[in-house]
Image: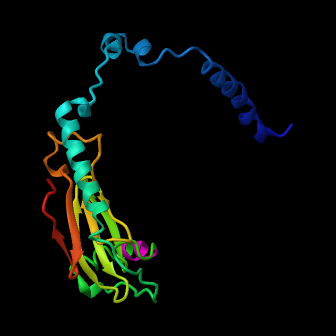
């Protein structure tokens, strides 16, 4: 018998024993840490959006957003279908810093207001930056920041920062309030809050 196989043959029984030990009943963290068993048994889950105040805020924001969307005031006529220009890094101070992500985002094609591409980049916890790039020129025209994302589409000029979400506790998050913008003259303009 070859002597180089001996160490491997000795490991075989250890491997089989190790696998069999994993078949025992596992009772979870409480079985290995009895001092935590009582704390683990308590139901400590609180759902922040069950508060009727938060629900009222969510409903108000949702209704306002729907009013903007349903008005038809922000629709675009045609979607740009021409040649898509590459990124113009000199058009914005942050374009060079984020060029790889912006170039990758441009592959989505036109996704906002008929002829623009919005590229969203994370900038930390509860922070996103949304860059608007003109697809005819490749220029970065504007950027806007959000806490919980954005809602937009290729068929209109409406851009909702922090769209309404029933899971958000609006009383605890001051920067989470939905805000509507229109994109006009190559920049964002905040719309007045709908009553």
**Where residue 175 sits: x, y (%)?**
16, 51
Front residue of 175 and 66: 66
User: Left or right of 26: which side holds 147?
Assistant: left
Residue sitting at x 30%, y 14%:
39
Residue that extends furthest to the right in the rendered view of this protein: 1
Front residue of 68 and 42: 68
Residue sitting at x 40%, y 71%:
111
Q: Is residue 106 magenta?
A: yes
Residue sitting at x 32%, y 72%:
75
Image: 83 above or below 78: below
Instruction: Give residue 192's quadrant in the image.
Output: bottom left
Residue sitting at x 35%, y 13%:
41
Q: Is residue 79 magenta?
A: no
What is the chief secondary structure element of the magenta stretch?
Answer: helix
Q: Which residues are magenta?
A: 102-107
Image: 36 above or below 4: above
Image: 28 above or below 47: above
Q: Quadrant of the N terminus?
A: top right
User: Left or right of 104: which side holds 26?
Assistant: right
Can residue 118 be seen from the camera position used here?
yes
Specify the color scheme. Answer: rainbow
Can residue 122 be seen from the camera position used here?
no
**Where residue 7 sits: x, y (%)?**
71, 35
**Where residue 55 sits: x, y (%)?**
23, 36
Q: How many marks can you see? A: 0
Instruction: Give residue 185's quadrant in the image.
Output: bottom left
Front residue of 22 and 56: 56
């Amino acid at each position: 018998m070859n002597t180089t196989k001996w160490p491997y043959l000795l490991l075989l029984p250890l491997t089989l024993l190790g696998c069999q030990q994993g078949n025992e009943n596992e009772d979870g963290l409480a079985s290995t840490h009895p001092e935590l068993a009582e704390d683990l048994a308590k139901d400590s889950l609180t759902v922040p959006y069950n508060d009727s105040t938060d629900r009222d805020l969510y409903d108000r924001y949702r209704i306002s957003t729907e009013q903007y969307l349903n008005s038809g005031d922000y629709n675009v006529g045609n979607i740009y279908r021409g040649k898509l220009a590459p990124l113009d890094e000199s058009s914005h101070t942050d374009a060079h810093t984020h060029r790889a992500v912006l170039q990758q985002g441009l592959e989505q094609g036109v996704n906002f207001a008929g002829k623009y591409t919005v590229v969203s980049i994370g900038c930390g916890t509860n922070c996103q930056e949304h860059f608007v790039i003109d697809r005819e020129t490749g220029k970065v025209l504007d950027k806007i920041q959000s806490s919980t994302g954005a809602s937009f589409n290729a068929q209109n000029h409406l851009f909702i920062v922090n769209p309404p979400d029933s899971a958000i506790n609006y009383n605890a998050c001051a920067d989470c309030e939905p805000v509507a913008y229109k994109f006009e003259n190559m920049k964002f303009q905040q719309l007045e809050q709908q009553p």
